[in-house]
Image (spheres, rainbow, N blue to C red):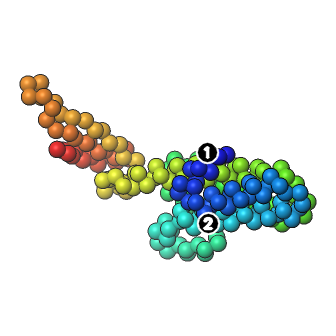
Amino acid sequence: MDNFLDNIELKHPLVARKIKLASDQLASATSIEEYQQIGILIRDAWIEFAQLLFSTGMVPEGKKQPGSSDVDAMLGYIMGQWNECPKTLRQLVKKLFNLSMEIQHDRGVSEISPLWCISITAMAMSLMLDLDSQHNKLADRMYYKCPKCGSIDISVDRGQEVDPMDGPLWHYENWACQVCDWYHNLILD
């Protein structure tokens, strides 16, 4: 779990601190109230995490913006922008957030639920940060979306033109949309 927390801490120290605090509290918890407090910490970590990754630009025009504590909606919009995000991860994240709230209110909670919630939350958040990082790298490319059809399924072929007599000439990129017939050739040097 430490590797996942390190990954989270690099980008969102407050979220990592809340998860670490929940983990430390679990190590010494003996009462139901202490276990419930762990649920509150994890719930708060999810709220903070969603607020950090969410931006109003993710909401399609005409749709209502989620409130500051509408974690399900914010996470849905966040994960909806990642093509590589598996449906299972979306379901897991929703269940983890719900589990944190269940732990918070469960009058018979034992050690196992908070343990699972802390561990899997750290893994899920770390994976989500990796997906967000990949998405942001795509967004920084010259062509993030196809100018013709709007698809983000664009391939890039990079290479260098070489003359047999003169040697290397210039670098190039060939951009092609995988959905429509758009392409663009670009000489870099």
- Quadrant housing residue 39: bottom right
Element carrying mark 2: helix
Residue occupying the point 60% across, 63% down: 14
The x and y percentages for residue 142 are 30, 53
The x and y percentages for residue 112 are 83, 50
Q: Identify the amino acid type marked 2.
A: Glu
Residue occupying the point 50% across, 54% down: 132
Q: Identify the amino acid type marked 1.
A: Asn
Residue occupying the point 18% across, 33% down: 161
Of tags 2 and 1, the one toward the viewer is: 1
Give the quadrant of the C terminus. Answer: top left
Counting residues from the N terminus, which is met first, the one under dot 2 or under dot 1?
1
- Quadrant housing residue 94: bottom right
The residue positioned farthest toward the top in the image shown: 164
The crowd level at tag 2 (other Cα within 10 Å; few <14, some 14-19, many 20+) is: some
Identify the mark at residue 70; answer none if there is no mark. none
The crowd level at tag 1 (other Cα within 10 Å; few <14, some 14-19, many 20+) is: few
Residue 139 against residue 41 in the figure, above or below: above
Looking at the image, can residue 126 be seen?
no
**Residue closest to the eye, 180 or 59:** 59
Looking at the image, can residue 162 be seen?
yes
The reply to whether the C-beta atoms of the residues labelled 2 and 1 are less than 8 Å apart is: no
Mark 1, residue position? 3
Residue 107 against residue 69 in the figure, above or below: above
Q: Give me the C-alpha separation between circle 2 and circle 1.
A: 20 Å
Q: Is residue 132 left or right of residue 16?
A: left
Mark 2, residue position? 48
Element carrying mark 1: helix
**Residue closest to the eye, 1 or 64:** 1
